[in-house]
Image (tube, rainbow, N blue to C red):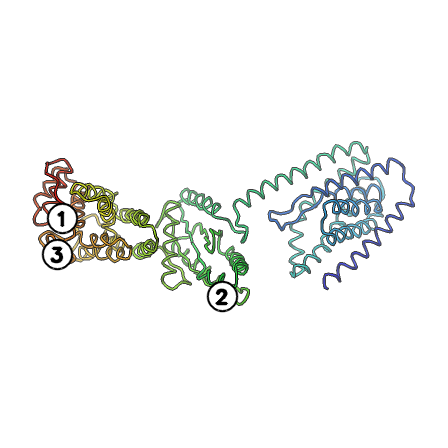
Amino acid sequence: MRLGVVLAPVWAAGLAVLGVAAYVFATTPHDAADLAGIAALFVVSMIAERYPVPLGAGDSGGSLSLGFVFGVSTIVIFGWEAGAIVLCLAPLVVSLIEHRPVVRSTYNASVFAIGAATAGIITSPFDGEGPTALLAAVTLAFATQFAANWLLVSLVVSIYAGQPFRPVLARNLQLMIVPIALMASAALMLVVLWQRSPLFSAALIGPLLAIALYQRSTYRAMRAMRLALTDPLTGLGNHRHFHERLQRELLDAQERNSTLSLCLIDVDDFKKINDRFGHPTGDRVLSQLATRLRQGGEGFRLGGDEFAVLLPGYDQSEAQGAAASIVERLAAVPLDHDVHVTVSAGVATYPSQGVGRDELIRLADSALYWAKEHGKNQVRIYRPDVVELAELKRLAAGPDRAARYRAAASLAKAVDARDVYTGSHSGRVAEFAARVAARLGADEETVELTRLAASLHDLGKLAIPEEILRKPGPLTEPERMILERHPQIGFRMLESLGVDPVAEWVLHHHERWDGTGYPDGIMGQEIPLGARIIFVADAYDAMTSDRVYRARLSDAEAIAELERCAGTQFDPAIVAAFAAEMGFVRIPTAVLAS
């Protein structure tokens, strides 16, 4: 109803103006040259209307026809009546050919007619042929036509969209002011050329149409590129765009010696919303959340109900505050059907926690999983001593046992990264232990379990303070007691993984053959075979690796030390097998102990 209040009078006024223009034009004598010129401008205006120039970068930015240039030029050269006919009928004919909405087409034509009549009245004092009069006529005609179009179209858009009139007016002005100014200059040049010689004007009409076509093709190419990087539901960057931007921001942070934080966000219990209200409601919820997410940084939708925000220049503390603000803001979004949602967020920061793109994503994802495991609707910063446990629990829930092995083994890299003196210690111990297990006659699965347990034997060190792990000298007694807790911590991390022997072998990999080891003080055959193998491999690699407080031993010296401690610290059979594997002695293949 409100829309009709605007449409009806504009239609009536436009029809009246067009009728008057047609009558005056028909009753006024015109020579053949004038009629040919008007016809040429009419045809060119139709072509321009057929290929409008897009405005703005978004799909909702609208478009503007270069028919404005030819219509206003017609008003100045041949009078407002001819201009009204060109401005009204050219778009109407194109609309009929392309089956455009009749209401919109007739309304726009009526607006053009009203603008043409108003322009004719305002420019009537400037009928002279001097440069000043010509400039004033073109400027006023263009400004009048633009003002009528801007005001009346914005009014209809405001009512139809249910938006306040002034913001719509301001947004349309921002979109249109620059192209309108450029087209006004083009109209002035066209009128000047036409007055000198109508044939000269063809030198301008051709390039104008070519520019319009080029602009459209460029816009389509840019739109295709934007769609390839944009999530169609939310308008945020998509998964591909996220990875590209994250890599670029990491490179920029490296060059600036700056920080970069990544915040991953997941809607809590989103499946319940889809199940209860349907997927259309769920899609609207995601779209509304995305609108608020744009206010917190550069946002992306990774898929489903998962989002990401890049925070360049944010350190860990600043990123935690920004993420907490995002969580609070999204929880306060008013949604349809009185739906209330919360989100969880995980944050990781370059370079203090991760240096590579994939590593930063993995750490932030682990922190997010931790946040969801501990009550949701909160932010968690990546901390290896607790986040890796959540990662292992998640792996344990997966159906693929082999995948769990591979993923759990990758966590050993996090351990080695925290100990500046060990390098790839876990990987080397894993290789030694697997070779010894194979020499002892273990089957393939047991060999791989031994490799996995050996790669994770120091997993509990993720919970040990770095000042202890990185201490350049011998540990004090309190520090040694803290360090000796790492087998129990690793066991607790691993016991839910679903690979039963691994956790037990990690727990006992510091038990001594004579029962004086830790944590349980068991001895001899009570110690699981895998733990005995790991203990020997671990000791050998430690002795053959450099430390700040001592030089590395040679391979022969390390083997000699293992043999000296066989029967007290180490299982003699394991030491013998290890020495044989390393090529120092030859022994018959042992029978695998239980």
**Residue 329 visible, this angle:** no
Which mark sits nearer the N-terminus, 3 or 1? 3
Q: Nearer the viewer, mark 1 or mark 2?
A: 1
Instruction: Tell me the amino acid under the disc marked 1.
Output: Ala
Q: Residue at x 92, y 41 (%)?
A: 29
Q: Which mark is residue 431?
A: none
Q: Nearer the viewer, mark 3 or mark 1?
A: 1
Q: Residue at x 59, y 40 (%)?
A: 221
Residue 134, image x and y in percent? 80, 42
Q: CA distance from mark 1 to mark 2?
A: 59 Å
Residue 524, image x and y in percent? 10, 52
Q: Residue at x 28, y 57 (%)?
A: 496
Can you identify the residue that label 3 sits on? 522
- Find numbered disc 1 in the image and state the secondary structure of the residue it sits on: loop
- Find numbered disc 2 in the image and state the secondary structure of the residue it sits on: loop
Q: Nearer the viewer, residue 124 or 283?
A: 283
Residue 337, image x and y in percent? 54, 66
**Is residue 331 rendered to the left or right of residue 528?**
right
Q: CA distance from mark 3 to mark 2?
A: 55 Å
Which class describes the residues within 10 Å of circle 3: few (<14), some (14-19), or many (20+)? some
Q: CA distance from mark 3 to mark 1?
A: 17 Å
Instruction: Tell me the amino acid under the disc marked 2.
Output: His
- Find numbered disc 3 in the image and state the secondary structure of the residue it sits on: loop
Q: Which mark is residue 593?
A: 1
Whether tag 3 and tag 2 are in contact, CB under 8 A, the answer is no
Can you identify the residue that label 2 sits on? 340
Residue 399, image x and y in percent? 34, 52
Q: Is residue 160 above or below residue 141?
A: below
Which class describes the residues within 10 Å of circle 1: few (<14), some (14-19), or many (20+)? few
